[in-house]
Structure formats: C-alpha cells, structure tokens
Image (spheres, rainbow, N blue to C red):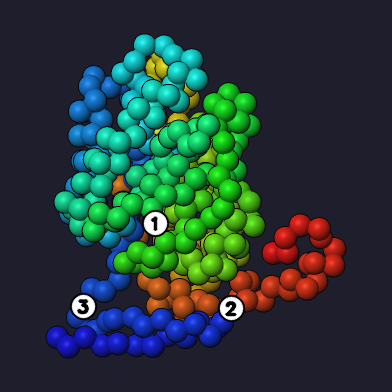
Amino acid sequence: MKSLYTKRFWSNGRIRIYKGGAGEMTTPLVGTVTYELKPLQSYEEYWQTVQMHVQSAQRQNVRLLVFPEYQTAQLLALQPVMTHAEAVAYLDGFTEEYVTRFSQLAQENELTILGGTHIVKEGDGYVNKAYLFYPDGRVETQNKVHTTPEERKVWDLKPGEDFAVFDTEIGKVAILTCYDIEFPETARIVADMGAEIILCPSYTDAPAGFYRVRYCAQARAVENQLFVVMSGLVGSVPGVEQIDMAYSKGAVFAPCDYPFPPDGILSEGMLNASMVTTAPIDLVRLNENRTMGNVSPYFDRKPEVYAKQSKSLPL
C-alpha cells in the first residue's frame, strides 16, 4: 500500500515529517529491560543472559532497547571479595569486551541498544558511563552528571560535565542516569536541545529510591511533554559487598494528557521481575499533545518571572 507523508508542526515552529499509511504499522516500539542480579558461574553466562533479553526484544520488533544502570556490576560475582577501589578497576578491565559485545548485538539484531552504564577509567579517575550502540556500528556515550553521595565517597566516581542529545531511528534521545532524573534542570536542558525521549537507566536498592526515580521520571515527562523510558536492576548477589539488593520495575511514561492515558503510563513491568517491557513511541501523538493538549507546561513557562526571584538557571 502506498505510504503517506504528513507534516506535523511543533508549537515552537520546528517541522518534522512522519511516514505512515493505512494498514501499516509505523509506530516504533521501545523496550526496557528489568535485569536480574544473581550469582554467576561464568563470564559467558552473563553474556548469554544479555543476549536472551536482546533476542526477546528483537522478536517483539523493538527498535530501541534500554538496559539498566551498572549493567556490568553482576560480573563482580566472579571474583573474590574486593575493596571498592579494586572493584572499579576490575570492572574497567571489561570495557573493551563490553563495547565489542554490545556493538555486535546491536548490529546482529538490527536495533539500537542502550547497554546500561559501565564503570570506566577516564583521565585520572573513573566515571559511570552510558553507552548507546547503533545497528550501523556507531557508539555514543553519556557520563552520569549527578553522582550520589555513595558514588562520590565510597566509589570515588567523577561526575560528567554536560549532556547530549542523540539522533536515533525512533526520535531524538537523551540519557539521564538514575539520580540525574531527580533534577528538573537536566530534563529541561535536553528538552531545549530537542530531546523527545529520555532514557533513564537506574539502580535502586530500596523502595524509596525506586519511587524517587519513578515519580521524578513521570514529572519530567509532564513538565517537558516528552517520553521517559525507565529501566532498573532487580535481585541480589549474596557475598558481594559492592552489590546491594536491587528493587525496580521497568516502565515507559508520557505526559498525563491527551492523547495519552490519564496516568501517563504507556507500559510497565512487574515489580522485581526479570523481563522486557515494551511500549509504542509515537511522535505524531507527542506532537498532538504539544499542540492540542489541555495544558502545555513546556511552552507556557515564564522564565522572565523565574529569573527575578532565583539565582539558579530559570526553568
């Protein structure tokens, strides 16, 4: 059947062109992995589990798949007890293999993969770095900017210094890792840079941490009228000091307004269950929300008012 092309105008004057036609499935799916931490018998067992999630997503026609923060932390289960300083160096030793394997998975399965985050040496310290792998072999990265007190004091991780927006086949994405999503300024910055989808890989070890990230992710979707994809770790690895019990569930959020569900939840997994959760990322509907929604929080901002009473960056 012949394809149709429709111009859609954003309220700020930008134009995007979307392809669609009757009888065609044109809305791409995003997938979020809830990854289970558990004891490992071998290095290959780890990669078999990663591959299983990727292949599950590929069978469901997912176009972009999001793994959680500290995706490689489970590899600490293969070594005797280490200090935190030894642990970061140990994980960094897997960097080349991590990049090679995830890049191969993205190319072989023809989908874009956020391989969660991985601790890597950068300069004279270590950072918590997210890697975005493309099906054509390209790799983009984003360092976590807001490190938690534990990351600073115990792990001695260095913070990132800026944010980026990346083009993908399903839209423009930004990566705000876990704690980064708890700062409204971060999402506003990437929204102003053109982000339509925020990817939020996370690792939370208690219900309070999980709900902080989840509720902030939902707030960022409302405030900036965009999608947020949240992934997380679950389970535990007994005997490994650096790995706390993980608590999470994957979800995909949209603004709580027309034409999306009233609660803004496009899809969510089961609590503390290993799985891939999928949802449609429909930029045409996102445009309808921005142009025809009941409210327009992103466009109705009054930075000139905020600037009068705040020394921080006007939101």
Q: Position of residue 65 (x, y in %)?
A: 32, 52
* Amino acid marked by disc 3: Glu
**Contact flag, marks 3 and 2 (Cβ < 8 Å):** no
* Amino acid marked by disc 1: Ser
* Amino acid marked by disc 2: Asn
User: In what element is the residue under mark 2?
Assistant: loop
Q: Nearer the viewer, residue 96 or 194?
A: 96
Q: Residues within 10 Å of mark 2 (few under 14, many from 20)?
A: few
Q: Earlier in the sequence, mark 3 or mark 2?
A: 3
1 or 3: mark nearer the eye: 3
Residue on which disc 1 sits: 267
Q: Position of residue 98 (x, y in %)?
A: 30, 37
Name the image quarter holding residue 86: top left
Residue visible at 53% across and 31% down in the picture: 124
Residue on which disc 3 sits: 24
Name the image quarter holding residue 232: top left
Q: Earlier in the sequence, mark 1 or mark 3?
A: 3
Residue visible at 25% across and 54% down in the picture: 137
User: In what element is the residue under mark 3?
Assistant: loop
- Separation of residues labelled 1 and 3 (CA atoms): 22 Å
3 or 2: mark nearer the eye: 3
Q: Position of residue 111 (x, y in %)?
A: 25, 57
User: In what element is the residue under mark 1?
Assistant: strand
Residue on which disc 2 sits: 294
The answer to whether residue 122 shows anywhere in this view is yes
